[in-house]
Image (spheres, helix red, strand yellow):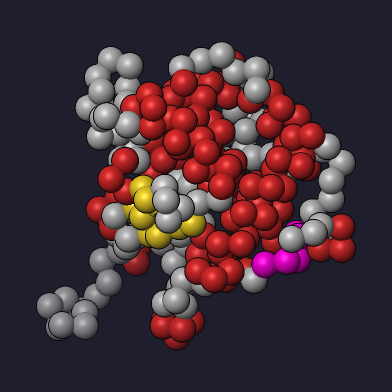
Amino acid sequence: MATTRTENEPTFALKGALPTPTVRHRASITDPTRLGAFLRSLDAFDGQPTTSAALRLLPILFPRPGALRAAEWSEFDLDAAVWTIPASRTKMRRANRGPLPAQAVSILRSLKAVTGSRRLLFPCVRSVTRPISENTLNAALRRLGYTPDDVTAHGFRATASSLLNESGLWHADAIERQLAHVEGNDVRRAYARGGHWDERVPMMQWWAAHLDGLTVDSTISVSAGSVMV
């Protein structure tokens, strides 16, 4: 109609005829007590070293599972504690640079002794040129005793988002940037080009330390008044 190639809207008759898809949020653990119990259960995981490392990194870094599974060693600078995911592997087709807390660097250095000579951090058992599948991570969660209604690999993003926001310590934009969410408002996006890096570095270290604390004592609060940074 805008280009005068038709005089009417041919899809108008379909209005209301197509059902709206049901949005199903991935299960996640947002209660500190349950999260602490989950983190302790990771200590008992006896699966493949690569799967174990991926499971331990999920709650610390809370990346999209696909980004973690297909991660390549060339993306990591462990000395600078930075993970840069190239645009070709991100959902929004924009390179994503994220800080690595000391706990994540330690896990990665241990993993490098296992798969560091290969391209992928988490190669499939059947083929070192292919990464492990998301089903591998979710199956590992099932082995730990957690059902699909309890937690999923993707659910750790909601875990971190919820608890970081509840802490009251960090700017919401820094949290969103760490989640690799893109600001929908063009004006705000223009002002967010800095990526809140100076805040994200201490935030990620605080988050990793907070998870360590929950592993030992799940009664630790996430409120700003009870947390030391």
Residue furthest out toward the left: 5
In the rendered view, would you say 37 is above or below 4?
Answer: above
Q: Position of residue 26 (x, y in %)?
A: 57, 40
Q: Is residue 5 magenta?
A: no
**Residue 39 in view, yes or no:** yes
Q: Residue at x 47, y 24 (%)?
A: 51
Picture quarter with the N terminus: bottom left
In the rendered view, would you say 106 is above or below 78?
Answer: above
Q: Residue 214's quadrant in the figure?
A: top right
Main SS category, magenta section: loop
Q: Position of residue 2 (x, y in %)?
A: 21, 83
Residue furthest out toward the front: 79
Q: Residue at x 46, y 53 (%)?
A: 81
Report the span colored magenta: 166-170
Q: Is residue 64 left or right of residue 36?
A: left
Q: Nearer the viewer, residue 69 or 138?
A: 69
Q: Residue at x 62, y 38 (%)?
A: 27
Q: Is residue 108 left or right of residue 89?
A: right
